């Protein structure tokens, strides 16, 4: 091989300061190499290190002796031995874990993550891909596009790597045939389009012989594209465009050396910031102005995505670890229910419904994962129904957090859209995920902070807000009893409001029918209204069948602990049907009315209601007295 | 360093600096009792500088810990005390009492010297003060098994490392949760190369031990290594006479175990130039890596070596 074009030894020797000036201004590209065991990945990396003089003489002599002992290249140097660092890997000749390597050219510094190829190491590959700007996907020219090629391409695409290089390797073993190369590229292009890969750069190379690595190969005169190094040096790093997006600074740590200084430290995930900028702190939504960008080297006039800084704000507003400081006019969304792609990283499979820790940016919350919608067969891209996710499985599921999360979609932000899941008992990192979107509406509405708090409202009314949630079958007596309870509360000078199912359906919810989805939405809206009224300091009474446990629990979770009082108006079906005040049971039985609770739609009774009344044993008045007695002293 | 370029694309050193600061802040936010391992070498100098940047205007909210073998160069002890005072940080020095009592030294005890003073000393020090997270200046470009180590590297209650059971580390999300008794070694400059460290020292004007620069020093040549006679504890073998040579050190450890190179590089630029043009790797001057074939460091780490 000729001397590689990018070795700058001459400059180092002649003018070290000029060289250092050049090195100082280099940008950085992080990339991964993937491919199956025999595609020559490690050999390619070894070649890049060797050609950029990152291998020293002592390492080289060790390599030469190792090559003879363990190498797979006969008497020639086996570059792969340079890269496979763990003893187990050297023995078995495979790459188990991600190894990070470094080399420089005149224009850039490179960090290469060498990832294992086997399917059982999908998690390692996902780890390597998570920080990469670019992926080099190796293909053995003799074998063409394999199952592994597809899997690796899919994973890279999933992790958001937009720069893909298809390196058709071992061209020396197919006589540098253009036909072979073209056929592989066409084959790959068809597959790539199918999974949404927008573009890729294909190169004919030989890692072993060095063709088209640093210099155009005389063996492939038909190839007019760049060499691998040329491409790596010039490709645009998308992360560098992060500073064009709105400001996002996840707060890591509050810097408080003394009473006169309060700074908020973090790594700017996107955007730029200058003193005088209006910012909004999420999730509270409070706004302020940046006064200083503090560093040890003096205050900055401007800081951009990728820098670690400390900001001071003009106002004494609440802001702590986990909050996000954002551009005031373009803040990120806040939500607690999402659809996400999950990659399972642990031997113990996902437990649907179990609480895990979710870490996203600097936020850590408790999360539950619902049964996955499907898992992806990473070899065929087929969607397969599943109940859980096993080690290395990739699936799509809904997740619910116990606290609102400041987020962006993964497509917009790796920092605010990528998360890990941590087992609460073992502390292991068991999963990784990427947020698609939130499942609740109105995320674009910002929380408007107000000065009169819910505590102030309650204090003015001299009462503790409550939501008395009456649930039970149609005709059980919910409205009647709720009405009696409200009358008694009024006599006690309590401020109340009664939300009645039938009445609400005439206005707020007149667009909703009686399907399961509409019933859930009906209760969600009523829950939100009840919550607003409780915030206003009222004692709210609601009379709704509200047949599903999950929705009642949802409303309970909206309110501060102890304010949600579930009252089960427990009337046997035959008693309620016997009363049939509105004639609805008759209609349902005759089939005129569909989805009627108790007839052709289920009622899930509360398992542990705060209060239970049985109207076949007591009158509405007695029931109301009983409820009041349970509620006292109402403070 | 901190001013971005006009195009907003940060240089590689700016990115590496921001990454290291981010890592240090994560540890301080999530660990109960962090500490910074301070060995007085150039990597430690960079680490200390980064810590001061990460928490400015506060002093770094953790102490410095020097696991001392009593056999460091005198220049190292001097710089250590000066830097601790300048940074406003508490300096903890630990010397394994068992090693002191048995008079363990590099001349008579070989590998046992490293094992007792450093490996055992470190474990004892971490246990004594109950540190649950310890910053170290190791880099992935130094050695093969380090290339695969995570930035947050977990140690069992007995300080062991299990390379096959490392936590996946995605994006820049670090899981710092651990059980009582377990600890984390954290390597904020994992992604730096030797050249990056040197250039950062130059750009930031970070003080380093003068031994990195060439000067006439008393030396003897022994077992293929050029050793400096730093104090009168150095037992001269028969026929050995210290010779003054212009030497410097690429890496600093215990003076009887650290090989010098003959050099005229007296400025940082010259040192970097020599480093780049040299044909042997940085750790080559150290005896420790060559034990047990290519897997020496991996085995040492499993036993609790940093």
Image: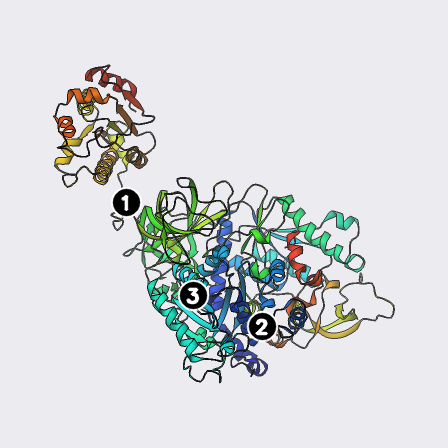
Along the line of sight, the residue nearer the viewer: A464 or A517: A517
Q: Is residue A51 left or right of residue B302?
A: left
> Mark 2 highlights which residue?
A54
> Mark 1 highlights which residue?
A449
Q: Earlier in the sequence, mark 3 or mark 1?
A: 3
* Subunit under mark 2: A
Where is the N terminus of chain A found, in terms of image quarters?
Answer: bottom right
Q: Secondary structure at mark 3?
A: loop
Q: Position of residue B85 (x, y in %)?
A: 60, 56
- How far is disc 2 from disc 3 in space, using C-alphas? 22 Å
Q: Position of residue A122 (x, y in %)?
A: 47, 56
Q: Which mark is residue A297?
A: none
Front label number (2 vs 1): 2
Q: Are marks 2 and 1 on the same chain?
A: yes
Q: Earlier in the sequence, mark 2 or mark 3?
A: 2
Where is the C terminus of chain A found, in terms of image quarters?
Answer: top left
Q: Position of residue A521 (x, y in %)?
A: 23, 40
Q: Are marks 3 and 1 on the same chain?
A: yes
Q: Residues within 10 Å of mark 3 (few under 14, many from 20)?
A: many
Residue A632 can be seen in this image: no
Q: Which mark is residue A133?
A: 3
Q: Residues within 10 Å of mark 2 (few under 14, many from 20)?
A: many
């Amino acid at each position: 091989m000729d001397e590689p074009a990018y070795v700058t030894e001459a400059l180092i020797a002649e003018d070290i300061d000029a060289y250092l000036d050049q090195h100082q201004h280099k940008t950085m590209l992080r990339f991964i190499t993937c491919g199956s065991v025999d595609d020559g990945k490690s050999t390619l990396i070894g070649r890049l290190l060797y050609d950029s003089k990152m291998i020293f003489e002592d390492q080289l002599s060790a390599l030469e002796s190792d090559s003879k002992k363990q190498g797979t290249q006969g008497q020639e140097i086996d570059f792969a031995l340079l890269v496979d660092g763990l003893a187990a890997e050297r023995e078995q000749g495979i790459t188990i874990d991600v190894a990070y390597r470094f080399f420089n050219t005149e224009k850039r510094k490179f960090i290469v993550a060498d990832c294992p190829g086997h399917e059982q190491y999908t998690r390692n590959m996902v780890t390597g891909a998570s920080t990469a700007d670019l992926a080099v996907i190796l293909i053995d020219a003799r074998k063409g596009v394999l199952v592994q090629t597809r899997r690796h391409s899919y994973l890279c695409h999933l992790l958001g790597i937009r720069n893909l290089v298809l390196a058709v390797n071992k061209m020396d073993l197919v006589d540098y045939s253009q036909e072979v190369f073209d056929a592989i590229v066409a084959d790959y292009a068809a597959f790539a389009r199918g999974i949404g890969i927008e573009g890729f750069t294909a190169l004919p190379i030989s890692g072993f012989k060095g063709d088209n690595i640093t210099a155009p190969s005389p063996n492939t005169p038909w190839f007019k594209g760049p060499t691998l190094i040329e491409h790596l040096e010039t490709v645009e790093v998308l992360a560098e465009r992060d500073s064009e997006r709105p400001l996002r600074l996840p707060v890591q740590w509050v810097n408080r050396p003394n009473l006169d200084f309060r700074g908020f430290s973090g790594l700017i995930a996107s955007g730029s910031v200058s003193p005088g900028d209006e910012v909004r702190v999420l999730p509270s939504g409070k706004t302020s102005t940046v006064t200083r960008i503090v560093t040890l080297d003096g205050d900055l006039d401007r800081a951009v995505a990728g820098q670690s800084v400390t900001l001071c704000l003009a106002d004494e507003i609440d802001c702590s670890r986990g909050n996000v400081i954002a551009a005031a006019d373009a803040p990120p969304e806040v939500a607690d229910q999402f659809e996400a792609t999950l990659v399972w990283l642990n031997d113990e499979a996902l437990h649907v419904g179990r609480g895990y820790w979710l870490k996203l940016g600097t936020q850590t919350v408790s999360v539950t994962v619902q049964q996955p919608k499907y898992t992806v067969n990473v070899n065929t891209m087929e969607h397969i129904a599943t109940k859980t996710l096993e080690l290395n499985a990739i699936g799509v599921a809904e997740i619910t957090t116990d606290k609102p999360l400041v987020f962006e979609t993964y497509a917009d932000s790796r920092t605010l859209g990528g998360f890990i899941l941590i087992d609460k008992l073992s502390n292991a990192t068991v999963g990784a995920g990427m947020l698609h979107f939130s499942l609740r509406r109105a995320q674009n509405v910002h929380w408007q902070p107000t000065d009169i708090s819910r505590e102030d409202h309650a204090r003015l009314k001299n009462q503790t807000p409550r939501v008395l949630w009456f649930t039970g079958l149609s005709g059980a007596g919910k409205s009647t009893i709720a009405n009696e309870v409200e009358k008694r509360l009024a006599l006690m000078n309590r401020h109340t409001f009664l939300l009645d199912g039938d009445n609400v359906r005439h206005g707020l919810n007149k667009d909703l029918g009686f399907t399961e989805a509409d019933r859930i939405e009906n209760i969600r809206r009523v829950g939100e209204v009840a919550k607003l009224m409780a915030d206003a300091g009222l004692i709210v009474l609601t009379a709704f069948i509200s047949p599903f446990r999950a929705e009642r629990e949802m409303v309970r979770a909206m309110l501060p602990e102890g304010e949600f009082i579930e009252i089960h108006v427990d009337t046997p079906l035959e008693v309620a049907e016997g009363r049939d005040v509105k004639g609805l049971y008759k209609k349902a039985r005759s089939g005129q009315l569909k989805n009627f609770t108790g007839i052709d739609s289920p009622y899930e009774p509360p398992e542990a209601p705060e209060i239970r009344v049985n109207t076949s044993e007591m009158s509405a008045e007695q029931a109301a007295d009983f409820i009041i007695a349970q509620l006292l002293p109402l403070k | 360093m901190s001013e971005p370029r006009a195009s907003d694309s940060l240089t590689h050193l700016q990115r590496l600096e921001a990454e290291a600061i981010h890592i240090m802040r994560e540890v301080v936010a999530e660990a109960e009792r962090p500490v910074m391992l301070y060995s007085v070498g150039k990597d430690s100098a960079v680490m200390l500088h980064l810590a001061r940047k990460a928490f400015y205007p506060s002093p770094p909210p953790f102490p410095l810990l020097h696991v001392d073998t009593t056999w460091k160069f005198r220049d190292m002890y001097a710089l250590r005390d000066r830097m601790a005072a300048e940074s406003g940080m508490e300096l903890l020095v630990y010397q394994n009492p068992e090693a002191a009592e048995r008079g363990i030294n590099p001349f008579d005890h070989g590998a046992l010297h490293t094992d007792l003073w450093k490996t055992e000393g470190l474990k004892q020090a971490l246990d004594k003060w109950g540190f649950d997270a310890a910053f170290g200046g190791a880099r992935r470009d130094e050695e093969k098994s380090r290339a695969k180590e995570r930035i947050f590297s977990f140690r069992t209650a007995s300080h062991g490392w299990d390379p096959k059971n490392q936590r996946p580390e995605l994006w820049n999300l670090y899981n710092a949760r651990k059980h009582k008794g377990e600890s984390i070694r954290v390597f904020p400059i994992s992604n730096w190369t030797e050249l990056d460290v040197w250039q950062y020292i130059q750009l930031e004007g970070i003080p380093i031990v003068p031994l990195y620069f060439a000067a006439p020093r008393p030396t003897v040549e022994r077992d293929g290594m050029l050793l400096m006679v730093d104090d009168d504890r150095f037992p001269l073998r028969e026929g050995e006479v210290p010779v003054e040579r212009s030497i410097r050190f690429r890496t600093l450890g215990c003076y009887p175990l650290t090989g010098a190179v003959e050099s005229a590089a007296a400025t940082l630029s010259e040192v970097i130039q020599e480093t780049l043009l040299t044909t042997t790797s940085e750790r080559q001057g150290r005896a420790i890596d060559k034990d047990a074939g290519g897997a020496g460091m991996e085995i040492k780490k499993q036993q609790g070596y940093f």
